[in-house]
Amino acid sequence: NAGVTQTPKFRVLKTGQSMTLLCAQDMNHEYMYWYRQDPGMGLRLIHYSVGEGTTAKGEVPDGYNVSRLKKQNFLLGLESAAPSQTSVYFCASLGGSYEQYFGPGTRLTVT
Amino acid sequence: AQSVAQPEDQVNVAEGNPLTVKCTYSVSGNPYLFWYVQYPNRGLQFLLKYITGDNLVKGSYGFEAEFNKSQTSFHLKKPSALVSDSALYFCAVSRGSTLGRLYFGRGTQLTVWP
């Protein structure tokens, strides 16, 4: 039981490049989330999904897209990266007792 | 709108002393309250939660928190701090169970010195 995993762990992009972050969970959870963590800002919700095939915007969705084609996977895409998207990205899934399970994070730097 | 305030960016305490990390919240409706801990270069780990019932909740690693509805607070406490408790602590709130959406505070860095 791996819990929540994220790929890749680190990435450096140039401005304007695109990439996809992959989140996978093996706990059969319906709800999944993408957050970004910036110093002094806590975690902010980018997008979330309440089930396969459904997604919704969170607090800071601009510049990101997501897809949930399979229940266990939640993808976060950056179509044209900007330096303001330099951050640590966390994926999470919601357990049956309301607590969220977090992945180890992806550290993204956009130059 | 939902929000969480953690008024202290840093809390420093000596090992063996009690610790408190403060959290106040604003939410419409019944709050679901959580504490998470983050160790360096790691994801967040769940510590404890308040959903309903007894205002004093106990969690992992000897931590506890008290829900105070009148003061809209949910302070994290531990009777005797350990050096290994040093980490970044986040308070979070959701409104009822609304899709599990959490609103996080900015975090409090706890340092326990030997």
Image (tube, rainbow, N blue to C red):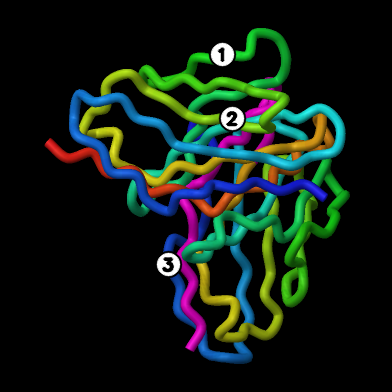
- Identify the secondary structure beneath mark 2: strand
Q: Residue A10 bears which disc, if any?
A: 3
Q: Is residue A109 magenta?
A: yes
- Identify the secondary structure beneath mark 3: strand
- Residue range in magenta is A93-111
- Identify the secondary structure beneath mark 1: strand
**Label 3 to label 1: alpha-carbon separation:** 40 Å
Give left or right: position of A21 versus B107.
right
Q: Quadrant of residue A95?
A: top right
How dense is the environment of label 3, judged by Cα within 10 Å: few (below 14), some, or many (20 and up)? few
Q: Position of residue A33 (x, y in %)?
A: 69, 48
Residue that numbered label 2 is attached to: B74
**Label 2 to label 3: alpha-carbon separation:** 34 Å
Are discs 3 and 1 both within one chain? no
Q: Is residue A59 above or below residue B8?
A: below
Q: Amino acid at mark 3?
A: Phe
Q: Position of residue B37 (x, y in %)?
A: 44, 38
Q: Nearer the viewer, residue B73 or A88?
A: B73
Q: Are marks 3 and 1 in contact (CB under 8 Å)?
A: no
Q: Is residue B89 above or below residue B1?
A: above
Residue at the extreme top of the image, as rendered: B54
Q: Is residue B89 above or below residue B40?
A: above
Q: Amino acid at mark 1?
A: Leu
Q: Residue B56 bears which disc, if any?
A: 1
